Image (cartoon, grey):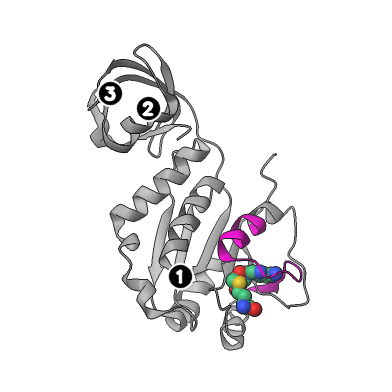
Amino acid sequence: MNLALLFEEDFIGGDRVRLTGRRLAHLHSVIRVSTGDRIPVGRVDGDIGTAEVLHLTDTEAELRVSFHLPPPAALPLTLILAMPRPKMLRRVLQTCATLGVKDIWLINSYKVEKSFWQTPWLSEESLRENLTLGLEQARDTVMPRVHIRKLFKPFVEDELPALLAGKRALVAHPGTDTPCPTHLNQPTALCIGPEGGFTPYEVGKLEEAGCGAVHLGARILRVETAVPVLVSRLFDACL
Ligand code: SAH
């Protein structure tokens, strides 16, 4: 937690905030704050700033907050991800939030196990929790939006073409001829397959919708590895 992300319900007055639960535990055990210390904070979907610890007990911390800086720039990326298995979903969501991805589409694909869609990690509350962990890591405040599409064909035929308008559109698929481009820094849509990969039919449908298939070399990466490798290859995060 390199920043405590604050939600409306955390505010107890204009510039006063009360923290309990996970964030309080982190203040005690990792940051080891004392009364009078300052910690980085951010207002969800707003600016980042600092908070002075006014009171600290085992059950709550009261902070005085002030905000003065915008959050880091978002990536111009729409990420379309075949629904990963639940354990991986959590990590991928956190990673996406940390990397600055703000638009995430979880879609079905032939090799996505049906049971994956039953996971409690897809609840609004769990999505927010994991995205918060990722944002706090990166000192970002802007909550990514997650869209869930449990049917591949209607999504690809009816929604995807409009989603790709004005964007460079790619599907990462091992064994294709074109290497993944670099230094794009422009609005981009990127599709990433499931553990078993997209089927040739699915790649064909994604290509029909306007996606160019690209590869990352001979090594097959896990989805959780493919996401940061693709993002850092496509965009210049240090600029
Ligand atoms: N067995 C599958 C691999 C799936 S890896 C297959 O051969 O297609 C999961 C997803 O990560 C892939 O669908 C792709 O989107 C991405 N990915 C992993 N390694 C890749 C690589 N070397 N090139 C392009 N995409 C890759």
Q: Is residue 152 left or right of residue 12?
A: right
Of callouts 3 and 2, the N-terminal one:
2
Q: Is residue 166 visible?
A: no
**Is 225 included in the stretch rendered in magenta?**
yes
Element carrying mark 2: helix
Residue that appears at 61% across and 87% down? 200
For marks 1 and 3, give the CA distance: 38 Å
Q: Is residue 147 visible?
A: yes
In the image, what residue type sits under mark 2? Leu
Residue that appears at 67% across and 70% down? 220
Q: Quadrant of the N terminus?
A: top left
For marks 1 and 2, give the CA distance: 34 Å
The residue at which mark 3 appears reads as: 61
* Callouts 3 and 2 close, C-beta under 8 Å: yes
The residue at which mark 2 appears reads as: 27
Element carrying mark 3: strand
The residue at which mark 1 appears reads as: 83
For marks 3 and 2, give the CA distance: 9 Å
Q: What segment is highlighted magenta in the picture?
A: 211-230
Image quarter for ligand 1 equals bottom right
